[in-house]
Image (tube, helix red, strand yellow):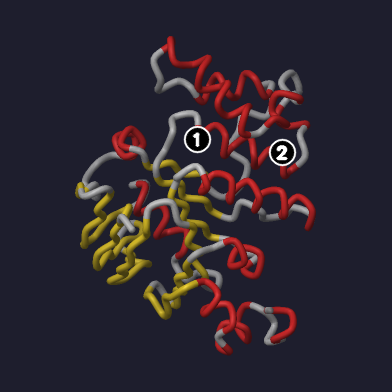
Amino acid sequence: MTVALEVVSVTAGYGDNPIVQDFSASLQAGSITTLIGGNGAGKSTLLRAIYGTNRFFSGRIVFEGESIERLPPWQRLKRGVGFVPQGRCNFPAMSVGENLKMGCYTLPAAAHEAAIGRVTGLFPILQQRWRIDAGNLSGGEQQILEMAMVLLVEPKLLLLDEPSLGLSPKMQGDVFTTVQRIAAGGVTVLIVEQNVRGALLISDRALVMEQGRKFMEGPAEEVRTDPRIRQAYLGGNIHQAA
């Protein structure tokens, strides 16, 4: 398989404080990888380092064969790196349609209609909610809207930070199904997710972070059934983890 992203000995953080330290990993094109770790392990910091919104100390980030670690976020977006940060990031007082139109701001005007048609085809619920203010959508619908806003620019790599946080079990399932549909379209996905079990079940591979460093890496099924991971993140119950 083709390698979409290589993170090579990356150290990154905020101000003078490195959070992620000497982290290396690679993501295969079209795969889903879950990034696991406790609070403060550096998961969100790593996503932000890949997208370019925090301080980069050292290392390399290679996307589709090109080093991008010194590029500003807008250039990374232009090259195909999309990021949906943790928490709501839509325009709540604007309708779903208006949010999608805002998401087209980096595209040529002539491409807007086709882009919106593509994402509403992928997520018909958005067409059904077209005139409803984004702030009046359910949490799961808002998360789908926010992923759609990023997908408008057709990223090849999608970084998702806690997409199911605060959602009901049903809405979490809807979000995970959406992630699978995105990856099935050829997009590489790196996901940080508090519902570790749910994320691992849809993932190809998993990365585990501890104190800013890589602790474990492997196929999602192997990581999910590892006794250390079950104990730390899955309640230690082999039947729950299965």
Residue reaching furthest to the bottom: 227
Type of amino acid at the residue the image marks with label 1: Val
Type of amino acid at the residue the image marks with label 2: Glu
Residue labelled with disc 2: 141
- Few, some or many C-alpha atoms within 10 Å of disc 2 (few <14, some 14-19, many ≥20)? many
| Element type where label 1 sits in the image | helix
| Element type where label 2 sits in the image | helix
Label 2 vs 1, first from the N-terminus = 2
Label 2 to label 1: alpha-carbon separation = 15 Å
Quadrant position of residue 145 = top right
Q: Is residue 134 left or right of residue 147?
A: right
Q: Nearer the viewer, residue 96 or 38?
A: 96
- Residue beneath the point at 77% across and 39% down: 138
Q: Where residue 214 appears, x then y in whole percent?
A: 38, 75
Q: Is residue 218 left or right of residue 175?
A: left
Residue reaching furthest to the front: 1
Query: Label 1 near label 2: C-beta < 8 Å?
Result: no
Q: Where residue 59 appears, x then y in whole percent?
A: 21, 62
Q: Quadrant of the N terminus?
A: bottom left
Q: Quadrant of the C terminus?
A: bottom right
Residue labelled with disc 1: 150
Q: Is residue 12 left or right of residue 219?
A: left
Give the number of callouts. 2
Q: Where residue 189 appears, x then y in whole percent?
A: 47, 52
Q: Nearer the viewer, residue 212 or 107?
A: 107
Q: Where residue 196 appears, x then y in whole percent?
A: 62, 68
- Residue beneath the point at 32% across and 52% down: 4
- Few, some or many C-alpha atoms within 10 Å of disc 1 (few <14, some 14-19, many ≥20)? many
Quadrant position of residue 2 = bottom left
- Residue beneath the point at 53% across and 14% down: 113
Q: Is residue 106 left or right of residue 117?
A: left
